[in-house]
Image: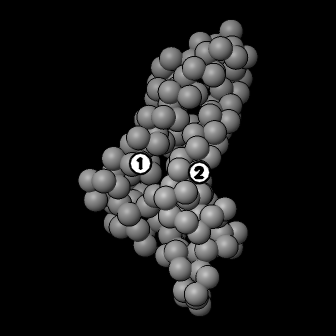
Amino acid sequence: MNVGSWMLWGFVATVALTAAQVATQELRLTRVNIPFMLGSIFTPERSRAKALGTLLHLVNGWIFSLVYVAAFQAWGKAGAWRGMLIGLVHATFVLVAGLPALPGIHPRMAHESWGPTARRQLEPPGYLGLHYGAFTPLTVLAAHLLFGAILGAFYRVR
């Protein structure tokens, strides 16, 4: 494994993914805010949750880029298309399994079956994250394709 290349391009790809997700929310294409969701697991204070969640998202993405790098190493080469293929699988997992599972582990997220309570006020994302808007699946997919494309294009296999 090329540690230096992973550290640099894994981080760059994570920053790009995070920026793309923030941009799609600011452009009102989706209401999903993964950094806020992550941070609000640990604190109910909105501004602290956003800051902590952004940090957690960056660290998680950087670590998760190791899965992409492991695939590149197994294939013996990287490439934007290979990275996008992994990004497609990654986004599919996030949309089909990750987001719908959040109410079961998030202490402040309402459950679809019994709705909000005084403590659980965050709206659950639902299947494919559709509770956060019709374009949510496309924005999540695009961000993960970007992540994979950057990492695949610039990571150098040893």
| Residue 94 quadrant | bottom right
Residue 29 appearing in the image: yes
Question: In the image, what residue occupies the spot 65% across and 26% down?
Answer: 69
Q: Nearer the viewer, residue 61 or 35?
A: 35
Residue 42 found in image quarter: bottom right
In x, y percent, where is residue 106? 65, 69
Q: CA distance from mark 1 to mark 2?
A: 16 Å
Q: Which mark is residue 52?
A: 2
**Circle 1 sits on which residue?**
21
Between marks 1 and 2 in the image, the one whose residue lies nearer the viewer:
2
The answer to whether marks 1 and 2 mark residues whose Cβ atoms lie closer than 8 Å is no
Q: Is residue 85 visible?
A: no
Left or right position of 45 against 133: right
Residue 152, percent across and down? 52, 24
| Circle 1: element type | helix
Instruction: State the colouring used for the structure image.
Output: one colour
User: Residue 9: x percent and y percent?
Assistant: 55, 22
- If you read the primary sequence from the N terminus, does the residue marked by circle 1 or circle 2 appear first? 1
Q: Is residue 23 above or below residue 12?
A: below
Q: Is residue 21 left or right of residue 58?
A: left
Count of numbered circles on the image: 2
Quadrant in which the C terminus appears: top right
Please indicate whether residue 22 sits to the left or right of residue 77 in the image. Answer: left
Residue 112, picture quadrant: bottom right
Which image quarter holds the N terminus?
Answer: top right
- Is residue 78 left or right of 137 when viewed as pictured? right
